[in-house]
Each structure stands twice: as structure tokens, then as C-alpha cells.
Image (cartoon, rainbow, N blue to C red):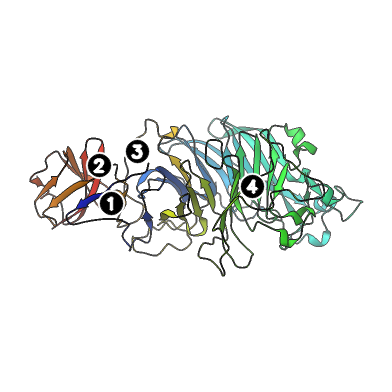
Amino acid sequence: MKRTLLFYILLFSFITLNSQNTVGTISVTADVYDGYTLFSTHTKAHLLDNCGQVINTWSSTYLPGNSVYLLPNGNLLRTGRLAQGANPIALPGAGGVVELFDWDGNILWTWIDSSETSRQHHDVFPMPNGNVLILSADIITQAEAIQAGRDPLQLLDSELYNERIYEVEPDGATGGTIVWEWNVKDHLIQNLDPTKDNFGVVADNPGKVNINFLNGFDAENNWLHINAIQYDEEFDQIIISSRRMSEIWAIDHSITTAQAAGVAGDLLYRWGNPQAYDQGTVGDRKLFGQHTPHYIPSGLPNARKIMLFNNGFGRTPEYSEVVIIDPPVDINGNYTYTPGTAYGPTSTFFRYPDTPPASNSEFYSAIISSARQLPNGNILVCEGREAFFFELDTNNNIVWEYASPISNADGTVYDQGDPIPPNNFAFRATKYSTSYSAFDGRDLTPGAPLENNPDITSCQSILSDEDFEVINVTLYPNPVQDYLNIEANVIIEKIEFYSISGAKILESSKIDNINISSLRKGVYFAKIYSGEKSMSKKIIKQ
């Protein structure tokens, strides 16, 4: 919610966060969206409030593999990275295990997709019916690739990876039934060899993928590098991101598995690089290593448009951007296409930054990352390479910044004041409304921030629930030794004292001569309540 708080404190007046904050919540304004942010790093998934205080944490034995989702019932769906072992499928973003936790961190279901023939990677998606959509890779042998029309000179690894999307219905603690499947190998085109499969005119078949288009990359087995799948319930379609093709695709999920292997399973829509289907040149390319394309759901600003994070990898200058496009689609999910041309639109509906920088930009993440539309019009951005999240208001002003203080490589927790940890990764960040059904009946009492030696006093003041136009509060003496007094122009009902780590250590209904002699010397937060309102102040115990 937006606050219009104006208050005066005798010894402290906070407007922005302390300038020395380098990790955790770095900056915040009252225009930040009121919600909880979820992300996964190292072996844990964390749900945080806007001051970086922990609402909940889920622990796994696996590093991210890579996506994480909080479900409407409060369960958590997370992918994990299994050791490579004997699995011959080696590609960035490899996972291998999908885990479902309850709110309290208990494992409800585990699904393993890591074998000599298959490996889950990058993304999964929780379906509305309780099933799980999974992105996986398996092997197309050298002989199979050549028969499919691959140029034999473009088989650097003597194989290709087939990208496979399947839907599994969980059963028990570790079981499941695959109820739907789509494979890219069923939707190929080539114009190299008429004696091989899939021969045809690439430009006349925009629904198929050119098996010989490399987009400037080496002829590796990981020729597509699909890095995201997002399901859209309203169209019953899956939106796919192919990093190597610099394209996003839409496919139909409403058809059967048998139909998905035929023409009905061809691409319904594609955008970002028309040269991939011989309807443009390199100069027409719009996307560079993009991640997380998805339809913005109805009910949100910019509804039914596609939002994505355009990483900017491989272009000059190097910079990332948040992009929204308005695809040529009707209310039933049917796309308009004119044969002999590229799919529209020819320009973006929205982009941040609105103009390219003159040189390489500080806003740049070569890999991973995401952007999400929020209900109040703000946009949450995950600059994934550094696990740095920020929120834009409707005027593209930054109203919140957060840097994860945890190294994704080894789980080291950094101190406030330290630089952003090296090897810091977050595949995505998602912010959920405080009214999201997952939080119904849950204990949402904030715990300590993730960073060591946190300093969130000013954040708590800025985001206080206090609505009074003017509040005069004096805490004295401050610094204090044994007894603290409160003087205010409102009725104070109670005061709670918290350690700098966020632990509640004392509570009092008194406002005069509050005995704090039992507290050790140091800095504490005093949370003051008046009716349903509260505000936090810093005190120094001598």
C-alpha cells in the first residue's frame, strides 16, 4: 500500500536507507509494491518482505536447477541440480530433480529426471490442475540428426539435444504419470538435402525450426538452449524462450500428445529474430539471449501482452532491457500472420531503459534474469547475474533495490557493508501480494534479514503502517542505560524491542521508565504500536 507518512523524531529522521547499505534492502520508497519477494540461491529458497526480513525459508540439499514457485496453497515447487555423474547430457542450467515442499519445509514429492537419456534443465511450471510442466533435454544421435537434415559439417559434438516439454501428474512421494508431451524434433525444417527428412522451403514454414540455423553460435549439441517455459492458462499455450535462436515461441497445449507430434504442434507464434525462418536479416534481430517471456495475466496492467527480460548478450553496446510486446493475437489465442513476412510487432510496446545507452551499461546481465508486472503498475526486475532485484514505478523510477547477501556458489552469508558477493546468481525473482492465498492462516511475523549486521531501521520507518498526518515521537534518553521513556502525541499501547538480527527480546505496555537494564550494550529497534498502526525507531543501549 502507498503511505503518506510524515513524522518527526527528536534524534532520528529517516528519508532514505542508510547510504552504507550494500546488500539486503539498499533503497526503498513508499511507492514500492506491498508484497513478499521469492527467490532461490544456493540450497535455499527465501521469501522476504520489502525490508529484506525473512518471512519463510525452504531448505534443500541441492543447488538451484533453476526455477522456484510459491503455489496458491502455500507449497513450494523448486528445481535442484543433481551432480553430473554418468549423465551424458551436459548443458548450462542443468537440474535433474524437482521437489515439492509444504509451507513448513517438509518434502511432499520428488521427481528425478536425470539419466543416460534425459535431463531436466532450467525451468518447470506448476499447472493449475496440480500437474507439473517440465523442460527436459534428450539426445538426437549423429545418425538421427543427419537423417533429420542436419548438415554433417555442423555436428561438432556428434549429436544434438532435442528439447522436450512434458507434463507429469504427481503420484505418491516420488512417482508420476506423464500425461502430455511436445518435442522440438517433431517440428523441424531444412533446405539442405532433399534426400533427408524435413526438406522444404524454410521461409514458407514459419511454424517449424530450421535445424541448420546457428545464429552465429558454434555448431554445438546445445543448439537451441531453451531457458524458459511459462504456461498461459487463458490461451492454454506454452511460451518458450530459445536463447540460441534469439526467439520466443508459442505452442498449443490444448492438443493431445499425438497431435503435438504433428502439424498441430508446430509453432503458433515466434518473435525476436526473423532471420531464423528466412524472413529477415541480422539487422531485424530484436532479442539477445532473452529469458522468462510470459503473457501478463488479465487483471494486471498491460494485460495480455508478453513481457520478457532481454539480456543483451552479444550485441554492441552490451546492455539489458525489460521489454513488453503486443502480439498480433485475438481473444481466443489465434495469431495473425501474413505469408512472406515476419511475425509482428515490428516495435516494442514498452522498454526499459527507453533508449539504448551510448556504451556498455551498468544494467547488464548476460545470463538468467526476469521481469514481472505487479498489480499497482510497478515492474519487478531480477538482474540475475548478481542476484540484484529492483522495482520500477510507472514512470520508470526505481522505488526498491535489493541485493542478495548469499553466495550461490558456497552459501557464504555476507555482512552489511560488504560488496555484492561473487558468484551471485538468482534465476528469477517473483513478488507475491500480501493477500495471496498462500499466506492465509500463516504466521508471517518477519524474522531477521539474511545479511549479517543488518541495518533496516530507516526501511521500517519508511514502510511503517502509520497513517497519521503528523506524529511527534521522542525516545529518551537515547543513548540509554537502564530506563527508557516515550513521549508522543498519540496513545501508545505497547512497545517491542528487537535485536539487530530481528529477534524479539522484550515487550512492555509502559511508556514511562521502561526497564531495559537487562539488555546488553548495543543497537536495538523499538517497535511502537498505536491501535493497528506501528513504527520502528532505533535506540542505543549503553
Q: Disc 1 and disc 3: Cα gap in Å?
A: 17 Å
- Which residue is tagged 2? 468
Q: Earlier in the sequence, mark 2 or mark 4?
A: 4
Q: Disc 2 and disc 4: Cα gap in Å?
A: 56 Å
Which amino acid type is shown beneath numbered disc 4? Arg
Q: Which mark is residue 501?
A: 1
Which amino acid type is shown beneath numbered disc 2? Phe
Q: Disc 1 and disc 2: Cα gap in Å?
A: 28 Å
Which amino acid type is shown beneath numbered disc 1? Ser
- Which residue is tagged 3? 444
- Which residue is tagged 4? 119
Left or right, 393 with respect to 276, comes to left
Residue at x 36%, y 48% (from the top left corner): 30
Q: Which of label 1 and label 4 is nearer to you?
A: 1
Label 1 SS: loop
Q: Position of residue 432 (x, y in %)?
A: 45, 41
